[in-house]
Amino acid sequence: MKDTVLIKSFPNGITLHLDPEIAFEDLLKEVAYKFSEARNFFGRASVALSIEDRTVSGPEEIRILEAIHANSDLRIICIVGKDEATNKNFIKALAHVEKKLAGDEDGQFFKGSLKNKEVLETENSIIVLGDVYPGSAVISARNIIILGGLYGEAYAGGSGCDGAFVAALEMEPERIKIGDFKYKPGKQGKWGIRPKVQPKIAYVKNDRITFETLTKDLLGTF
């Protein structure tokens, strides 16, 4: 009998091979069953997730993530595609960033982009699976990881937690505040016309907010 859900591992992540023909509700039950059965095997690992063989919508992605969360102790830090040229630049770095969330049982993720002056506020560390557009903001009492572009505002470490940071795959913020320290760029070009950027992390060093390229080696020092 053909397996409708197959779970395979790759470095720093797992791939879900999903039957493209089965009804989604039946598929979701099988996802829940497979991860429940493998709960002890996977433990509390932090992984990236790749979904293959079936095209799923945004709402379906969220339901799959919810099923995994409810039936395992895995921490899904991001969803990646087949574009290895893009993925390889940040998966390892993000795996190390996630260590900062390891002691935060209430860490969470938000799927979608913030736009039209939307504000996302939480007491927990948060991973945003999308972009933060100009005029919008994400506010966390702990750490912020944006798996997209930060073009709006980000406020981290609101609870006074030491070592708070903001990380983003594209870092061009309107404003950042970490703890009591603030950063606002000088002259900004028109948004949308910008050079190729690298994943960066912002944190407090020598009483000022510092930006550095997001790398495995850098994050290993945190």
Image (cartoon, rainbow, N blue to C red):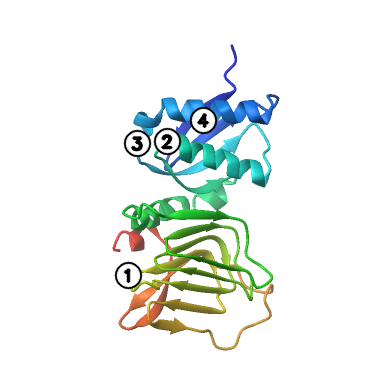
What residue type is disc 2 on?
Ser
The residue positioned 33% from the left and 74% from the top of the image is 160
Q: Which mark is residue 32?
A: 4
Whole-angstrom CA distance, mark 1 to mark 3, is 27 Å
Which residue is most to the top? 1
Q: Which residue is mark 2?
A: 72
Whole-angstrom CA distance, mark 4 to mark 2, is 9 Å
Looking at the image, tell me whether mark 1 or mark 3 is earlier in sequence order. Answer: 3
Q: Nearer the viewer, mark 1 or mark 3?
A: 1
Looking at the image, tell me whether mark 4 or mark 1 is earlier in sequence order. Answer: 4
Evaluate if marks 3 and 2 touch, with contact meaning CB atoms under 8 Å apart. no
Q: Residue 172 appears at what percent x and percent y?
A: 56, 74
Q: Check disc 3 and report its element: helix, strand or loop.
A: loop
Q: Check disc 2 and report its element: helix, strand or loop.
A: loop
| Residue 169 versus residue 158 in the image, above or below | above
Q: Which mark is residue 161?
A: 1
Q: Which residue is mark 3?
A: 43
The residue positioned 60% from the left and 22% from the top of the image is 4
Whole-angstrom CA distance, mark 3 to mark 2, is 8 Å
Q: Residue 27 appears at what percent x and percent y?
A: 61, 28
Q: Residue 154 appears at what percent x and percent y?
A: 51, 72
Q: Nearer the viewer, mark 3 or mark 2?
A: 2
Q: Nearer the viewer, mark 3 or mark 4?
A: 4
Whole-angstrom CA distance, mark 1 to mark 2, is 28 Å
